[in-house]
């Protein structure tokens, strides 16, 4: 029993890392039964409430508005569920913004933080964000900043006299009082971690997107598809939309990276606030579009683990019933995000 309890305690933090699932345990609900459920996004970008899930009986999912048919609940609980179900993504960063807008208060601050395991997993992206920071504070003039081992050595054996002097210079250049520098660094860490999280999510499905585009190209070339102009056009629209979403997300992430590089070239409070504002204002749209892309690709990969599975009719049905629904909304969200970042308009 102790082992099961430990496993459960490990699973709870990791549940916060999902972009398409929201455990309701931390939400201000009065129903204990409902607190044991979670919200899930399906490939059509619809939200369902998963009331139960195990290896024997499977997953019991119901529409948010139908919860009252399965358990006693209050009008307030129902209102909260309806509001949460309307969100496009459940990642912790977009949740921070959206929960405030919805007026939903979460008492447990850790519920809106990534798990320690995820933070550690994102360390593969951290060097490019941490290196400028280490250079400014500990390592100016050092040659060992370009390897993980070198950075670790600096932390193990830092030049504290140099670090203190560099912190004073940093405070003077940024206009941030020396006593507030630790808080500033904490905020910087949170911003870069959010970008690393989205980048990790995007790169995790990158190979699937590439294989999918080949799979769909072959489907469009098949005689069964070409025989129906309507089906051929729908498949072309799905291909164009998925290609646009993937390329645009990549471009947005690249712009965020450029923002970090610009900030460290001219480090001051105003440049940081501008960078943070730009990134945080994109959390909701980045989470939404990335959630849609990930959910659709995961289901496609599960259904078609290789390109030889499924005949043309099976593939066409999947494209039209699972992939096409919700794509228009994802495209709209991505176009709006590009406008906020002043990126060029792309017609899709």
Image: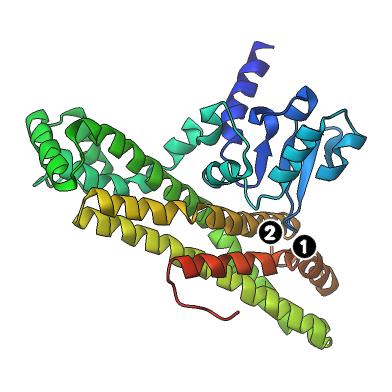
Q: Secondary structure at mark 1?
A: helix
- The residue that appears at 42% across and 54% down in the rendered structure is 279
Task: Look at the image and tell me in which quarter the N terminus lies.
Answer: top right
Badge 2 is on which residue?
296
Query: Height in image: 230 above or below 192?
Result: below
Mark identifier at residue 218: none
Q: Secondary structure at mark 2?
A: helix
- The residue that appears at 53% across and 79% down in the rendered structure is 346
Query: Height in image: 75 above or below 328?
Result: above
Among the two numbered marks 2 and 1 on one chain, the one whose residue lies closer to the N terminus: 2
Circles 2 and 1 in contact, beta carbons < 8 Å: yes
Q: Nearer the viewer, residue 224 or 101?
A: 101
Task: Look at the image and tell me in which quarter the C terminus lies.
Answer: bottom right
Quarter of image, res 223: bottom right
Quarter of image, res 298: bottom right
Q: Nearer the viewer, residue 6 or 175?
A: 175
What is the crowding at mark 2: few (fewer than 14 residues within 10 Å), some, or many (at least 20)?
A: many
- Residue 130 in the image: x percent, y percent? 28, 44
Badge 1 is on which residue?
322
Q: Is residue 124 left or right of residue 287?
A: left
Q: Gap between marks 2 and 1, in whole Å?
A: 7 Å
In this view, which residue lies farthest toward the right? 69
Q: Indicate the colouring scheme.
A: rainbow
Query: Height in image: 147 above or below 14?
Result: below
Q: Is residue 222 left or right of residue 118?
A: right
Quarter of image, res 332: bottom right
- The residue that appears at 80% across and 72% down in the rendered structure is 316
Q: Nearer the viewer, residue 208 or 247?
A: 247
- The residue that appears at 53% across and 57% down in the rendered structure is 286
Q: Nearer the viewer, residue 21 or 109?
A: 109
- Residue 340 in the image: x percent, y percent? 47, 66
């Amino acid at each position: 029993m102790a082992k099961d309890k430990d496993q459960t305690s490990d699973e709870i933090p990791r549940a916060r890392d999902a972009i398409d699932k929201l455990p309701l345990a931390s939400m201000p609900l009065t129903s204990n039964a409902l607190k044991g459920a979670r919200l899930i996004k399906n490939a059509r970008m619809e939200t369902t409430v998963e009331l139960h899930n195990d290896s024997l009986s499977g997953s019991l999912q119901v529409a948010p508005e139908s919860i009252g048919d399965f358990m006693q609940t209050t009008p307030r609980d129902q209102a909260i569920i309806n509001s949460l179900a309307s969100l496009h993504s459940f990642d912790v960063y977009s949740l921070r913004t959206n929960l405030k807008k919805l007026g939903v208060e979460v008492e447990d601050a850790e519920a809106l933080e990534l798990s320690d395991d995820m933070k550690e997993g994102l360390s593969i992206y951290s060097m490019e964000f941490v290196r400028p920071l280490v250079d400014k504070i500990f390592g100016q003039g050092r040659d060992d900043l370009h390897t993980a081992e070198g950075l670790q050595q600096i932390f193990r054996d830092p030049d504290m006299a140099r670090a203190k002097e560099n912190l004073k210079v940093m405070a003077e250049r940024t206009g941030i009082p020396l006593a507030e520098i630790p808080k500033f660094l904490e905020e910087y860490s949170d911003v870069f971690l959010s970008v690393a999280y989205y980048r990790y999510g995007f790169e995790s499905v990158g190979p699937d997107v590439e294989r999918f585009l080949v799979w769909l190209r072959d489907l469009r070339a098949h005689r069964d598809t070409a025989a129906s102009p309507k089906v051929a056009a729908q498949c072309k629209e799905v291909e164009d939309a998925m290609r646009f979403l993937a390329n645009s997300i990549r471009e947005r992430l690249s712009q965020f990276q450029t923002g970090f590089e610009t900030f460290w070239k001219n480090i001051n409070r105003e440049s940081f606030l501008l960078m943070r504002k730009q990134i945080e204002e994109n959390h909701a749209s980045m989470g939404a579009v990335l959630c849609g892309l990930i959910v659709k690709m995961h289901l496609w990969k599960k259904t078609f683990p290789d390109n030889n599975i499924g005949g043309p009719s099976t593939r066409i049905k999947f494209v039209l019933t699972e992939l096409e629904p919700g794509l228009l909304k994802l495209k709209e969200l991505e176009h709006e995000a590009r406008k906020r970042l002043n990126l060029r308009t792309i017609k899709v």
